[in-house]
Amino acid sequence: MSPVRVLAVGVHVLDVHVRHVESIPEGSEGQIVDQIRVSPAGTAGGTAVVLSRLGAEVHSAGALGRDPLAGVLRQLLEHHGVDTTRLVTRPDVQTSASVLPVRPDGARPAWHCIGANGSYTLDDLDLTTLGDYDVVHLGGPEFLGGEAAGALLEAARAAGATTSVDLLAPGDPDMLEWVGACLPHVDHLLPNDEQLRGFTGLDDLGEAARVLLDRGVGCVAVTCGGDGALVATAAGVERVPAFEVDVVDTTGCGDAFSAGFLLGVAGGRTPAQAAVLGNATAAQVVGGVGTDAGTYDLASVDDFAIRTPTRAGR
């Protein structure tokens, strides 16, 4: 069977992880930490890496700067099997990057520079090639805006691809309106619980997801941290529990879930079954530092899902 072909469009970031950090040193003082490493990330780039590791054929499309960060990010993507020929170079802005101080419990605040991600437009992408892909995943539609994102996703659907979207920005009703024009062209929307509540102003995730379904989204698959995921379609709402794992770093868990979920539905699994694969994939990543943490493939992740208890089973 041929691998699933995916185009990951949008946000590509180089993450710098520092662990463990419990406080910021005063003044110019220093602090010894356990580890500093870099990893490819972003709602497009991070998802691309994990999809490739699960066996998909993945092509990245986005914007990088002309700087050493770009060279490192491109090399890391290619190391994980991602085709980078569709990444464009911006000579006047830096490559997007984040510095993530990882706390002992795995939580991580962030300092982020938008950089070249903010310069990417539809003019950088040949829409006539969208028919080459089974899935077109747009990470960060807020940078394109709703109308441009809608045009991309509409063209992808017309070419026969399944579409998916994951936003980078925090949830806010104004942000939802900014990208609202693309929602009728989204097969799978992949927010986290805080984003979904922020977009809709509703605390109940099932009710909040239905707001997005009413806006035209086909399926809303919501990550809920240690509580797993919630999947909402016209057929109803299902909760999918997380697996029992030790948390090292939560960076990239949402992107890993997206990758597992998208590969699952592309392979014929139901949305709830795909969410199980998404949770199991995220469990591989949370045990290490960065989106590219862990050693796994699709078979080993499926095996993990079979033999590992979920939090609901406690």
Image (cartoon, helix red, strand yellow):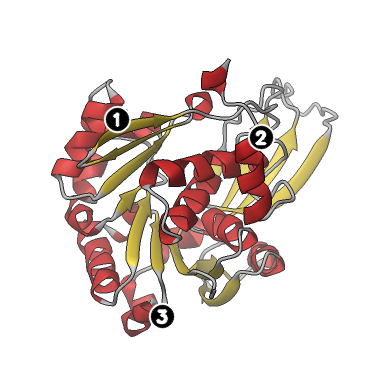
Between 114 and 26, the one nearer to me in the picture: 114
Which residue corresponds to mark 2? 307
- Whichever of callouts 3 and 2 sits on the residue coming sooner in the sequence is 3
Looking at the image, is 112 positioned above or below residue 27? below
Between 127 and 55, the one nearer to me in the picture: 55
Tag 3, which secondary structure? helix
In the figure, is residue 49 to the left or right of 185? Answer: right
Q: In which quarter of the image is the N terminus?
A: bottom right
In the figure, is residue 287 to the left or right of 236? Answer: right
Q: Residue 284: where, in percent of width, then height?
A: 66, 42
Q: Tag 3: residue type?
A: Asp
Q: Tag 2: residue type?
A: Arg
Looking at the image, is 237 positioned above or below residue 298? above
Q: Quadrant of residue 95?
A: bottom right
Which residue is rendered at x = 55% and y = 47% of the image?
256
Q: Tag 1: residue type?
A: Gly
- Whichever of callouts 1 and 2 sits on the residue coming sooner in the sequence is 1
